[in-house]
Amino acid sequence: MRTYKVLSALLGYPDQELIAAADAMRAVLAAEDRLPAASRAGVGRLIRRLETVEPLTLQEEYVALFDRGRSTSLHLFEHVHGESRDRGQAMVNLIEAYRAHGLDIAARELPDYLPLFLEFVSLVSAEEARATLGETAHILAALAIRLKRRESAYAAVFDALVRLTGDREAIASLTGIADASDGASDDAAALDAAWEEEPVTFGPGDAASSSCGTACGKWANVDFIATPAKQES
C-alpha cells in the first residue's frame, strides 16, 4: 500500500527532494483513500507545512524532535529495549523479516528506523501490513501523544498509523491527551512495562509476497507511483 510509503517519507529528513514530492504524496493519499478523514486532513496539513515553511526551520525542528533524546526517537526498539542486550536480537529478527521479503538495507540506518520499517510494511499484503504494524501500535500511540503535547504537525502521521493498525486500545489512548502530564520520564517506564510481557517481535512472513530488490536506499520510499520491482529468480 503506497499510503505507507507516503507516511514513511514524511518521517524522513525534510530536504528539497521530499518537499518536491508534496503533490505526489497528496495524489497517493487521495487515490488510495485509506486514512480516516481527520487523519488525512492532519497529514495534509503537515504536507502543506513542508511547502510553506522555510526549509532550514523545518530541518531544525526535525532534528530537535527526532534526533535528540529518546522520548520521540524514530527507532522503535529504543522505546522497548533501550540499550539492553535484547535490542540486538530484536534487530537481527527484523533484518531477517526484511530479507524474507527481498528488502536489503542499503541505507545507513538501523533496521528499527521507523521510515524503513514502514517501507517494509508497504511491500507486504494489506492483512500482513496491518498485523505487522499492529505489533508497534502502543509505541506509535505514545509517540503520537508526545508529539501532540508539543503541538507538532508530525503527530498527524503517528495518529494515522495508529488508526491503520485497528488496535482499539491504542486508538482509545489517543483521547484525553490534554489531561496527561509530560513528566521528566516522558512515560518511558510505562512504555517498557506495557511491552514487557508482549515484546515486539518480527518474524519472516511469506517471502514470495513482494520484493524491493537490493537497492532500497534512503529515498526508495519517494517512488510512490512505481510498484516494487519483482525479485529475480
Image (cartoon, grey):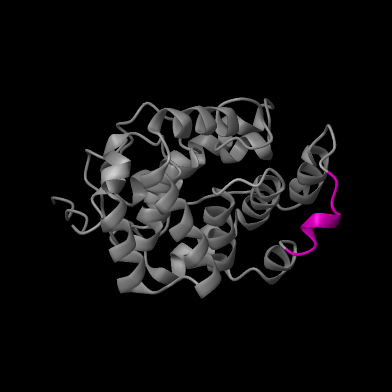
Q: Answer left or right for 2 relative to 147.
A: left
Residue visible at 76% across and 45% down in the picture: 191
Between 172 and 99, which is closer to the camera in this rendering?
Answer: 172
Q: Which residues are magenta?
A: 175-181
User: Is any atom of residue 97 visible in this view?
Assistant: no
Residue visible at 45% across and 63% down in the picture: 129
Q: Position of residue 209 (x, y in %)?
A: 30, 63
Rendered position, 202 above or below 209: above
Residue 205 belongs to the span the image colors magenta: no
Q: Answer left or right for 175 relative to 6.
A: right
Between 51 and 146, which is closer to the camera in this rendering?
Answer: 51
Residue visible at 28% across and 47% down in the picture: 222
Q: Position of residue 115 (x, y in %)?
A: 44, 44
Between 138 and 54, which is closer to the camera in this rendering?
Answer: 54
Residue visible at 35% across and 49% down in the picture: 100
User: Is any atom of residue 14 visible in this view?
Assistant: yes
Q: Position of residue 39 (x, y in %)?
A: 53, 66
Residue 184 location, quadrant: top right
Q: Answer left or right for 210 relative to 167.
A: left
